[in-house]
Image (cartoon, grey):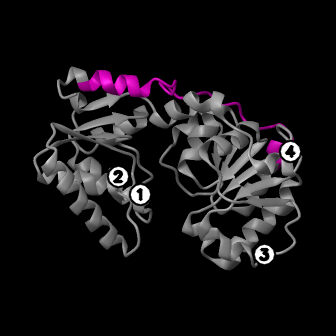
């Protein structure tokens, strides 16, 4: 079913999701509701299911940034407080859950469903128009994604960040522009190295990631994808809900520290970036393990 939030305040959007999902569950009762990730519909559907005395399993349970200014963190905490079963991406997530009183028998360490999607689609990725239009070649460009309010909503901070990236990368920086970024980007001039394009499809974006010299981002998912692809990732955030991408993968967090950002870009250009490893069970078979776990619970 389509639970798109549409327009209106966040509270209004959440209420609409809850009303529609309640109708769905009343019309089609079930033994278990499986919710995924940390979006508002994840939390809203969890609340509805529990009010109707339906068990809930949370895929990506236990993930934490410990940053309460992030809407996603609120969604994660609320969902995990109500869920009955947890399918986790890492041992760190397992420990986060145990610290809140979740029992071992409720936790199933299965891996990362996002990596299932990534690995299953690698043979289908396709060259975006920006590739030929700018005569790009593998490992000769950077990719940039920005969408978090802390990076894009303050015009002066955003302009300073974009100007620094333009000066330091020294090579094409491909920037699929998120809608919330468009307005402030128009006010920044002299960006000779930054090549903007409309948002890309998943298959086009993965094509760019796979062939990039490095990625500069504030996205959580991109941290995971670059780790599996072995691509250097510079994260413009002060915290991450995916610490394994730093401790094991190719990700480094620089926050809003310009000196760290410049040093990181220089390390990439000089070939000094760390070689990461792929976290445990990020092997493309997470969905299989989830199904087997559900069957073992006799609720599939």
- Dot 3: few (<14), some (14–19), or many (≥20) neighbours within 10 Å? some
> Mark on residue 76?
2
> Mark on residue 72?
1
Q: In the rendered structure, which disc, 4 or 3, sits on the residue that comes first in sequence?
A: 4
Question: Residue at point 30% right, 65% down?
Answer: 14
In front of the other: 68 or 33? 33
Q: Secondary structure at mark 1?
A: helix
Residue 2 shows up from this direction: yes
Residue 157 shows up from this direction: no
Vertically, is 171 above or below 103? below
Cα separation between marks 1 and 4: 35 Å
Q: Which residues are magenta?
A: 266-294
Q: Which residue is mark 3?
A: 188
Marks 1/2 in contact by CB < 8 Å: the verdict is yes
Q: Which residue is mark 4?
A: 136
Question: Residue at point 39% right, 51% down?
Answer: 38
> Mark on residue 125?
none
Vertically, is 87 above or below 284? below
Q: In the rendered structure, which disc, 2 or 3, sits on the residue that comes first in sequence?
A: 2
Cα separation between marks 2 and 4: 39 Å
In front of the other: 30 or 74? 30
Percent x, y for residue 237?
Answer: 59, 57
- Dot 4: few (<14), some (14–19), or many (≥20) neighbours within 10 Å? some
Q: In the rendered structure, which disc, 1 or 4, sits on the residue that comes first in sequence?
A: 1
């Amino acid at each position: 079913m389509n639970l798109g939030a549409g327009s209106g305040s966040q509270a209004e959007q959440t209420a609409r999701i809850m009303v529609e999902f309640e109708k769905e569950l009343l019309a089609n009762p079930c033994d278990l509701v499986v919710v995924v990730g940390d979006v508002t519909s994840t939390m809203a559907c969890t609340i509805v299911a529990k009010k109707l005395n339906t068990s809930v399993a949370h895929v990506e349970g236990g993930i934490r940034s410990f940053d309460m200014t992030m809407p996603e963190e609120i969604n994660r905490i609320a969902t995990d407080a109500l869920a009955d079963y947890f399918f986790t991406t890492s041992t760190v997530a397992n420990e986060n859950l145990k610290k809140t009183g979740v029992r071992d028998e409720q936790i199933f360490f299965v891996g990362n469903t996002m990596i299932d999607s990534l690995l299953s689609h690698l043979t289908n990725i396709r060259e975006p128009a920006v590739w030929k239009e700018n005569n790009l070649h593998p490992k000769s460009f950077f990719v940039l994604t920005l969408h978090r309010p802390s990076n894009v909503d303050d015009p002066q901070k955003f302009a300073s960040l974009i100007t620094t990236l333009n000066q330091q990368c020294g090579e094409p920086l491909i920037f699929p522009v998120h809608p919330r970024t468009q307005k402030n980007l128009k006010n920044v001039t002299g960006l000779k190295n930054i090549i903007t394009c409309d948002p890309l499809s998943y298959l086009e974006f993965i094509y760019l990631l796979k062939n990039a010299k490095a990625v500069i981002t504030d996205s959580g998912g991109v941290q995971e994808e670059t780790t599996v692809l072995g691509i250097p990732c510079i994260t413009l955030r002060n915290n991450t809900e995916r610490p394994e991408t730093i401790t094991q993968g190719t990700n480094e967090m620089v926050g809003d520290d310009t000196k760290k950002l410049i040093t990181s870009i220089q390390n990439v250009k000089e070939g000094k970036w760390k070689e990461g490893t792929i976290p445990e069970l990020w092997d493309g078979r997470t969905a299989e393990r989830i199904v087997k776990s559900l069957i073992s619970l006799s609720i599939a």
